[in-house]
Amino acid sequence: MAQQSIITKDRNVPLDKIRNVGIIAHIDSGKTTTTERILFYTGRSYKIGDIDDGNTQMDWMPQERERGITIVSAATTTFWKGIRFNIIDTPGHVDFTAEVERSLRVLDGGVVVFDAEEGVQSQSETVWRQADKYRVPRVCFINKMDKLGADFDATVEEIRERLGANPAVMVFPLGKEQEFKGIIDLLT
């Protein structure tokens, strides 16, 4: 039997080389900004869009650009090391929880973004429960380590305590707040 594939304008991709990944989290954790960077660093876009400038690829509705928040889930595609990643950037505001749940049904995995200063928020707990419901595997991404009040260890502990997860740290921040310099990869 021939292997099924999806034919796109520029690539013929076997189904076993396609992953649907959602970016899920509380409002203002940096989901859209994270997605913009993924698109840039994988070569899918030539510049990083900025929410404050209203020029992100993912927030395309005028209301999203005006308010600086994601209202509807938006999908895009990028490629990395022979894998096609369909990325779904989801809303973080509690009013759009149903939109997140609708997206979770098609995901192979999720990236749960946490603000290093805010930690686990109420909507973080909601999307975590929703992901549990649909058995979506997750990785946690602790964002905004350069923000005043950022606390990596406290955020990891909140993930453990409030979400009942057992996170395995794969990268560790080098500094925090104004002293943040980058990350240390603990795997390689």
Image (cartoon, rainbow, N blue to C red):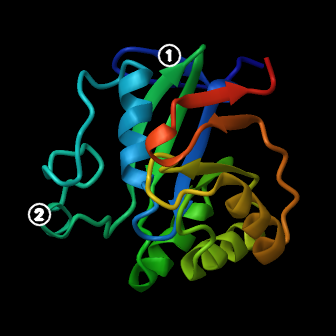
Identified at 66% across, 77% down, the residue is: 125
Residue 132 pos. (x, y %): 77, 69
**The disc labelled 1 sits on which kind of residue?**
Asn
Does residue 88 appear left or right of residue 19 in this picture? left
What is the tally of numbered marks visible in this picture? 2
Residue 186 pos. (x, y %): 79, 27
User: Which residue extends farthest front?
Assistant: 179
Q: Which corner quadrant of the image does residue 47 belong to?
A: top left
User: Which quadrant is home to the C terminus?
Assistant: top right
Q: Which corner quadrant of the image does residue 78 belong to?
A: top left
- Which residue was labeled with disc 2? 62
**The disc labelled 2 sits on which kind of residue?**
Pro
- Per the image, label 1 sits on a secondary structure element best described as strand
Q: Which corner quadrant of the image does residue 178 belong to?
A: top left
- Which residue was labeled with disc 1? 12
Instruction: Assess disc 1: are there few (<14), some (14-19) or many (≥20) residues with their C-alpha within 10 Å of its C-alpha.
Output: few
- Per the image, label 2 sits on a secondary structure element best described as helix
User: Which residue extends farthest right?
Assistant: 166
Relative vertical location of residue 9 with respect to residue 93 in this rendering, above or below? above
Q: Please tell me which residue lies in front, 116 or 35.
A: 116
Relative vertical location of residue 100 with respect to residue 90 in this rendering, above or below? below
Q: Please tell me the numbered disc located at residue 113.
A: none
